Amino acid sequence: MSSDLGINPKTSKPYTVILVDDSRSMRMYLKQFLLSEKFEVISEANDGSEAVRAIKILDIKPDIMFIDVEMPELNGIETVKAIKPLLPNTKFIMETGKTDPETVKELLSLKIDGYIVKPYDRKVLSDKITAILKS
């Protein structure tokens, strides 16, 4: 596995990431994976409302946002709709435990860059992120 997946080849700097998930353990697993691949996690949020507030105050805009679909308060789909217009250059990756056609169709209608299915598998995660960064 590449140890520099998180380094932007154009700038030689780490891609910046925000994690939005109400599951602390999922955020921690994803954060550990991303840090091991040299990404820079600049912020974490427990729900969409917290993420929207963070985006408005952060000086650094993320290159990538990982957003859980099912969260209390503001779910992932509502969060993407609120944040995407503010971050036209950010890649959006949704996280979901559901793979039913309705959920997948709804995710794709958001014009996100991709989605990953929980629970995470390191190899699948790495391959999916690699494909999204190249697109």
Image (tube, rainbow, N blue to C red):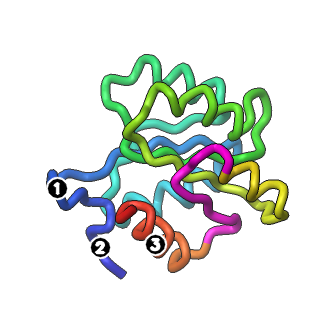
Which residue corresponds to the image point at 64% horizontal and 35% vertical from the top-left? 46
> Residue 26: x percent and y percent?
64, 55
First of labels 2, 1 by sequence position: 2
Residue linked to disc 2 = 3
Measure the C-alpha gap from mark 2 to mark 3: 10 Å
Q: Amino acid at mark 1?
A: Lys
Measure the C-alpha gap from mark 2 to mark 1: 17 Å
Q: Are marks 2 and 3 in contact (CB under 8 Å)?
A: no
> Residue 33: x percent and y percent?
46, 64
Say which of marks 2 and 1 sits in front: 1
Residue linked to disc 1 = 10
Asked if residue 34 lies left or right of residue 27, the reply is left
> Residue 111: x percent and y percent?
58, 47
Q: Which quarter of the figure is the C terminus placed in?
A: bottom left
SS class, disc 1: loop
Which region is colored magenta?
Answer: 109-120
Which residue corresponds to the image point at 61% horizontal and 59% vertical from the top-left? 115
Q: Is residue 112 magenta?
A: yes
